[in-house]
Image (cartoon, rainbow, N blue to C red):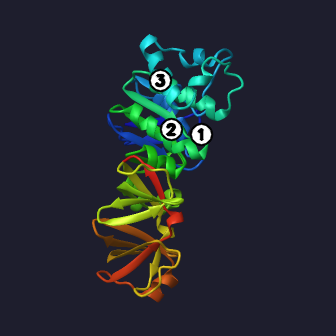
């Protein structure tokens, strides 16, 4: 798919060529502020001319509620069946008792819950969401993300965000936008762990994203199992339910074989599979069981540790640097 926007007498402000959107897939449009993410979504939604002609439900970055009742706003544009579904979703988002009240006093997060419920209740085969979790309180985002993923179901979705945790919670694929151009796209874990160039790496960081299962809670931490290894992290995950494990390559330390664990709960021995020099950093791929740890270290640390392709190293990540997110 090619989507572009040009103002008369100027170069294109957005020129996205080859964007792959597939039914049944949740694609995250990721990039820094000013990259053109919202403009792209507006073109896809048809609120700007030049986009595709398709049926979609669209949540703008700033949803609008009118004066009047909250329940009345929730049902705008919906038939009776869709309105009932929206009411169900709003209740699950904690808004059931607010539907009989005026919409004007609602907070930004409450307005977002109403707008999300209304959009997700629509029947269109595509759902377009612009920063759906941004106004939601941090402690509630995991629950809202879980409901969004469930309600989207087998439909296609395009989700704009600049937040890595939102991307990991909602997306299966990622398209990285920089200065109005598509720089990389593919499965979420592949883009995060293998940025195509230095610009993409600067935008997304170099990160690790694994699929796992929640197995325990230990005080303020939770524990997930990924293949044969256990991962300690922070997050509200259910025991026995699928989850995602997310941590940045910069959070990975290279530990000596006999080094005490100290405050590092996650320690994994593995084989160095790849080494990439990047000027002020060195990226290592370490095979640990069935997964791969991506570590980003300084050249000084590289010289001190001296790892080589095929050598065994011990990687460490503090539990506080690992996010455990519901879903999979």
144 lies above or below 162: above
Q: CA distance from mark 2 to mark 1?
A: 8 Å
287 lies above or below 234: below
Most distant residue in the top direction: 80
- Per the image, label 2 sits on a secondary structure element best described as helix
Do the numbered discs 2 and 1 sit on residues whose CB atoms are within 8 Å? yes
152 lies above or below 206: above
Quarter-of-image position of residue 315: bottom left
Q: Residue at x 40, y 68 (%)?
A: 294
Estimate the x, y position of residue 74 in percent, counting from the top left. Answer: 55, 19
Residue behind mark 3: 88
Q: Residue at x 35, y 41 (%)?
A: 20
Mark 1 and mark 3 lie on one chain; the one further toward the N terminus is 3
Binning the other alpha carbons within 10 Å of mark 3 as few (below 14), some (14 to 19) or many (20 upward) gives some
Residue behind mark 2: 144
Mark number displayed over residue 136: 1
């Amino acid at each position: 798919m090619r989507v572009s926007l040009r103002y008369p007498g100027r170069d294109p402000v957005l020129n996205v060529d080859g964007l792959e959107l597939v039914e049944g897939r949740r694609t995250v449009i990721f990039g820094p502020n000013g990259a053109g993410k919202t403009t792209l979504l507006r073109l896809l939604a048809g609120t700007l001319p030049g986009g595709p002609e398709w049926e979609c439900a669209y949540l703008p970055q700033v949803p609008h509620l009118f004066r009047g009742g909250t329940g009345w706003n929730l049902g705008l544009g919906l038939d009776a069946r869709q309105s009932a579904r929206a009411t169900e979703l709003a209740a699950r988002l904690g808004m059931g008792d607010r539907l009989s009240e005026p919409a004007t006093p609602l907070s930004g997060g409450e307005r977002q819950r109403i707008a999300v419920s209304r959009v997700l209740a629509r029947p269109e085969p595509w759902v377009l969401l612009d920063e759906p979790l941004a106004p939601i309180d941090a402690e509630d985002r995991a629950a809202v993300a879980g409901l969004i993923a469930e309600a989207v179901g087998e439909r296609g979705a395009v989700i704009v965000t600049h937040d890595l945790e939102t991307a990991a919670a909602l997306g299966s694929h990622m398209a990285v936008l920089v200065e109005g151009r598509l720089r990389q796209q593919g499965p979420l874990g592949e883009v995060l762990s293998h940025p195509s160039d230095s610009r993409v790496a600067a935008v997304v960081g170099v990160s690790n994203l694994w699929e796992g299962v929640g197995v325990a809670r230990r005080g303020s931490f939770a524990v997930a199992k990924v293949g044969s290894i256990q991962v300690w992290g922070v997050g509200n995950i259910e025991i026995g339910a699928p989850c995602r494990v997310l941590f940045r390559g910069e959070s990975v330390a290279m530990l000596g074989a006999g080094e005490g664990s100290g405050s590092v709960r996650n320690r994994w021995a593995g084989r160095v599979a790849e080494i990439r020099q990047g000027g002020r950093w060195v990226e290592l791929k370490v095979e640990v069981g069935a997964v791969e740890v991506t570590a980003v270290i300084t050249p000084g640390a590289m010289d001190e540790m001296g790892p080589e392709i095929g050598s065994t190293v011990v990687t460490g990540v503090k539990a506080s640097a690992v996010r455990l997110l519901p879903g999979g």
